[in-house]
């Protein structure tokens, strides 16, 4: 049995979880403490097995009322995949108009998430 | 001659506080609400906060700043509230007469009620008397956020962050994602001033070290910053000799606190509380100037925008009531003061005749404590709190029936 301290990132409470788990045969959570809600328990299990994150960035817009459109993932992605997803975002160019929630990249770098616009951008007049 | 008009409720500032206040004033039945915003777009600082995590309380989902703002902008537009963008309020007096400058020229507005929602600005290198030269490459974290996220400009390649406020942590991650090397975050206090979740997802995830009780003691560089000297500090925050080290960097980001932007409020005679740098307010969020209300970061620095919106809901409604139902001057002013372990409390006075939410911050991190609200020896309310942290605002709602015959309230950590 192993013990690990994790800071839960589900909400601003940021509970400092104490997780007791076993590594063999597979990672299995035995107990979670210091969590204010049930979400912390589920999160701790996923964090030990495969940490998932949302990321936010921006994409260059051509002829838009903003130079950049802010974007984010619509599904959390594995922490180690952040770098390659960022590379796909950096390479991308889009044209105005863009509507909030519009999917701008499908499965960036093959990762099962979409990169969606978090603001609308009009055509520059 | 200057054009003169009369408006019932005038909201100054179109960020999260101003938007929610204007919406709430209109919904409370006031048919004449005007919002004045300095920038060309509404939404304020949320426009540059492209990371997610906003709205968990209000909407039960994690939105980015622009998405959170858009929810309010959509509602604001659907209510057909008047707005003047690219417009600044130059002066305001005690009678709520505003001198306003817009592209169309100067305008004088007699307001029935005013809601102050101007937000904050960042503390700068000058504001914290940072020693050393003043080369290019030293930015406040929010400024860096603005130019990176709205203007597509990169601020540097090798950065050091001073101050562990949330904006600094968010920008440490942002710079890393954009390909810069963030060497470390230094915090002069013995604890972080950002949310724990941001320590995890902005620093730990990217192996960016955080050094507590450590600060920048010198900036090096002629034209562009080329390094900083940092040192550990003792419990009086004085650098400890022999702990100095030099870091080679081309950028220094400062996340060292926010200052409520109250120049306009002061001009109108609004009394400010030195503990919050915002107005003294009663339980209707009215300042010392009758008919002038305040909410959001201009009133006190908030940790979460959700709390800003909730406070602004209340300020907007109360401003509408003030112009529609006449003065609601309670005459009775029961003082609420911070006791042991509490940095400030808000509002500073209550009437005892309405429900009120006390907001406050603690002085030091603590675990498993009880926060007490007392009238002399009598306990009016107690709340168990698992974790207290100076970076987090704590709120305790009080029902009016427990406030009967209360003569004063003191909040303290047991």
Image: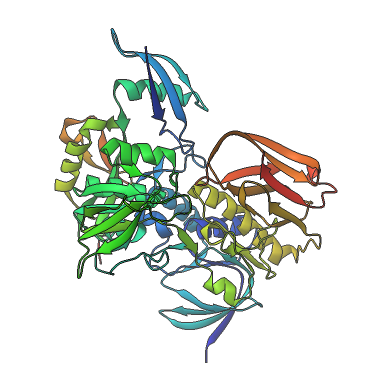
Is residue B63 left or right of B309 when viewed as pictured? left
Q: Quadrant of residue B124?
A: bottom left
Q: How is the image coloured?
A: rainbow
Q: Residue at x 68, y 57 (%)?
A: B348
Reply above or below: A55 against B87: above
Q: Quadrant of residue A23?
A: top left
Residue lying furthest bottom: B1
Reply above or below: B353 against A8: below
Q: Position of residue B160 (x, y in %)?
A: 27, 53
Q: Residue at x 44, y 57 (%)?
A: B257
Location of the C terminus of chain B (image quadrant): top right
Question: Does residue A98 appear in this view?
Answer: no
Reply above or below: B69 against B414: below
Q: Position of residue A5 (x, y in %)?
A: 40, 26
Is residue B310 left or right of B321 when viewed as pictured? left
Closest to the observer, B186 or A14: B186
Q: Residue at x 66, y 47 (%)?
A: B340
Closest to the observer, A71 or B251: B251
Residue lying furthest top: A25
């Amino acid at each position: 049995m192993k013990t690990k301290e994790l800071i839960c990132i589900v909400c601003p409470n940021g509970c400092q979880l104490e997780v007791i788990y076993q590594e063999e045969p597979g990672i299995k959570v035995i107990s979670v403490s210091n969590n204010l809600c049930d979400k912390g328990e589920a999160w701790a299990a996923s964090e030990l097995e495969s940490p998932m994150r949302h990321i936010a960035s921006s994409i260059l817009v051509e002829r838009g009322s903003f130079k950049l459109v802010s974007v984010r993932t619509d599904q959390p992605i594995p922490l180690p995949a952040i770098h390659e997803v960022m590379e796909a975002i950096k390479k991308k160019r889009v044209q105005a108009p863009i509507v909030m929630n519009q999917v701008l990249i499908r499965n960036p770098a093959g990762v099962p998430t979409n990169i969606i616009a978090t603001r609308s951008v009009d055509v520059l007049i | 001659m200057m054009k003169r008009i009369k408006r019932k409720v005038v909201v100054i500032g179109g960020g999260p506080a101003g938007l929610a206040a204007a919406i709430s004033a209109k919904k409370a039945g006031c048919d004449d609400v005007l919002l004045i915003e300095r920038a060309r777009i509404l939404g304020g600082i949320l426009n540059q906060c492209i990371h997610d995590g906003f709205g968990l309380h209000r909407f039960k989902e994690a939105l980015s700043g622009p998405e959170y703002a858009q929810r309010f902008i959509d509602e604001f537009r659907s209510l057909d509230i008047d707005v003047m963008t690219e417009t600044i309020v130059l002066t305001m007096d005690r009678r709520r007469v505003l001198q306003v400058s817009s592209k169309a020229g100067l305008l004088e507005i007699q307001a029935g009620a005013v809601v102050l929602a101007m937000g904050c600005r960042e503390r700068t290198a000058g504001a914290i008397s940072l020693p050393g030269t003043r080369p290019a490459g030293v930015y406040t974290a929010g400024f860096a956020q603005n130019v990176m996220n709205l203007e597509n400009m990169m601020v540097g390649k090798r950065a050091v962050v001073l101050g562990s406020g949330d904006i600094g942590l968010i920008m440490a991650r942002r710079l890393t994602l954009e390909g810069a090397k963030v060497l470390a975050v230094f915090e002069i206090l013995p604890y972080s001033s950002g949310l724990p979740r941001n320590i995890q997802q902005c620093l730990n995830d990217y192996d960016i070290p955080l050094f507590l009780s450590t600060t920048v003691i010198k900036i090096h560089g002629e034209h562009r910053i080329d390094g900083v000297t940092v040192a550990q500090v003792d419990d009086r925050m004085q650098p400890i000799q022999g702990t100095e080290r030099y870091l080679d960097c081309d950028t220094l980001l400062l996340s060292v606190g926010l200052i409520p932007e109250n120049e306009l409020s002061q001009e109108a005679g609004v009394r400010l509380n030195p503990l919050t740098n915002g107005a003294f307010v009663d339980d209707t969020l009215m300042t010392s100037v009758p008919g002038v209300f305040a909410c959001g970061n201009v009133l006190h620095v908030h940790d979460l925008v959700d709390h800003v919106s909730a406070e602004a809901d209340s300020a907007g409604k109360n401003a509408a009531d003030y112009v529609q139902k006449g003065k609601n001057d309670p005459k009775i002013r029961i003082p609420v003061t911070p006791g042991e372990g509490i940095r400030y409390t808000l509002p500073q006075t209550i009437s005892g005749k309405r429900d009120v939410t006390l907001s406050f911050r603690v002085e030091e991190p603590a675990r498993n404590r009880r926060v007490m609200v007392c009238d002399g020896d009598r306990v009016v309310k107690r709340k168990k709190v698992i974790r207290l942290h100076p970076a987090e605002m704590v709120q305790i709602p009080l029902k009016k029936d427990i406030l009967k015959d209360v003569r004063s309230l003191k909040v303290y950590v047991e």
